[in-house]
Image (cartoon, rainbow, N blue to C red):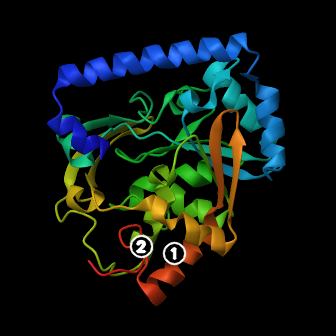
Amino acid sequence: MRAFLKYIVPQFILNSYHWFKRQKRAAQLRSDKENGQILTSAKITETLYQFGIADGDVVMLHSSLSKLGFVEGGANAVIDGFLNALGNHGTLAMPSFPAMGFNADYLKQHPVFNVQQTPSRMGSITETFRQRAGVSRSWHPTEPVCALGKHATYLTEAHHLHDTPYHQQSPFYRLCELNAKIILMGVDFNALTNLHTLEDAVKEFKYPVYAAERIPCRIIHPQGEIVYQVAYHNPVWSKKRKCNALMEGFKTGGFLKIGTMGKATCYSIEAKAMHQWMLTHYIEKGITMYTPNGETL
């Protein structure tokens, strides 16, 4: 919906909206600080422990810094809080997608993806994380994932070996293999990229969610360059997603926890259990993010 609105709303109106939004956020943060409503790195770690995150876990974080309230130390404090909770044997991963809106439009305007330099557009936490020393990034031009820790290389090393982004060697599928926990912090199920693993896991997925064409993109990485034929989601089907409608089913499945971090609502989802639930319910009832009630399209 956001991408669609960007096409129909004049730019000067969008600019005014974003300016007022920034001013409102700045005022709220000042109020939080003055009232002692401060979220620290230590509090983040403590909250994660209460949320069931343990030393050695693998976590995929989708986040919105603005929804947390005033965070002392900003994005770096959030990252530190997670890394402290995960310990020396844990792994932290985040999406670092460079596109806002539809990938087809982005690829046509940006035919080159530099693994080390192209910024993430998934929020300030992800971009700060991308620039941290030691972070690995997968070589995918539209859905790259960054990771740090024990399983970082395993998560990111093979993303570019297939044309679709959610295949069995992708970071998203490997999160399932590692029994990872997916944290949605201040964002809803529309940010839950692992929902797409169903589409690649089913040999002949019943809906044409990928466009038929492939768009070539030049990937620049530390070992050189490759030309990658990118499969992208069909915008017509992207508009049909009803991700939040899956929440009740996930609750019933027993692999979803709901809590808070600062001022933000947080969801913790077991990646492997979610993937298996989706696969089973797709086969038995036709449930997908496009048809959350099993309806026929």
Q: Position of residue 2 (x, y in %)?
A: 31, 41
Task: Left or right? Give the position of 136 relative to 98.
Answer: right
Task: Left or right? Give the position of 147 relative to 5.
Answer: right
Q: CA distance from mark 1 to mark 2?
A: 7 Å
Task: Left or right? Give the position of 145 relative to 240.
Answer: right
Q: Are marks 1 and 2 in contact (CB under 8 Å)?
A: yes
Toward the bottom, the furthest residue is: 284
Which residue is tagged 1?
A: 278
Q: Position of residue 106 (x, y in %)?
A: 24, 40
Q: Is residue 289 above or below residue 144?
A: below
> On the rendered image, what quadrant is the C terminus found in?
bottom left
Total labels: the figure holds 2
Residue 84 visible: no
Q: Is residue 27 above or below residue 240?
A: above
Which residue is tagged 2?
A: 288
For badge 2, the amino acid type reads Thr
Q: Nearer the viewer, residue 138 or 52?
A: 52
Q: Nearer the viewer, residue 2 or 86?
A: 2
For badge 1, the amino acid type reads Met
Q: Secondary structure at mark 1?
A: helix
Q: Position of residue 192 (x, y in %)?
A: 50, 54
To which quarter of the image does residue 40 belong?
top right
Query: What residue is shown at x 38% (from left), y 17% (from top)?
Result: 20
To which quarter of the image does residue 222 belong?
top left
Q: Nearer the viewer, residue 134 or 200?
A: 200
Disc 1: CA contacts within 10 A as few (<14), some (14-19) or many (>=20): many
Q: Secondary structure at mark 2?
A: loop
Q: Nearer the viewer, residue 268 or 61?
A: 268
Disc 2: CA contacts within 10 A as few (<14), some (14-19) or many (>=20): many
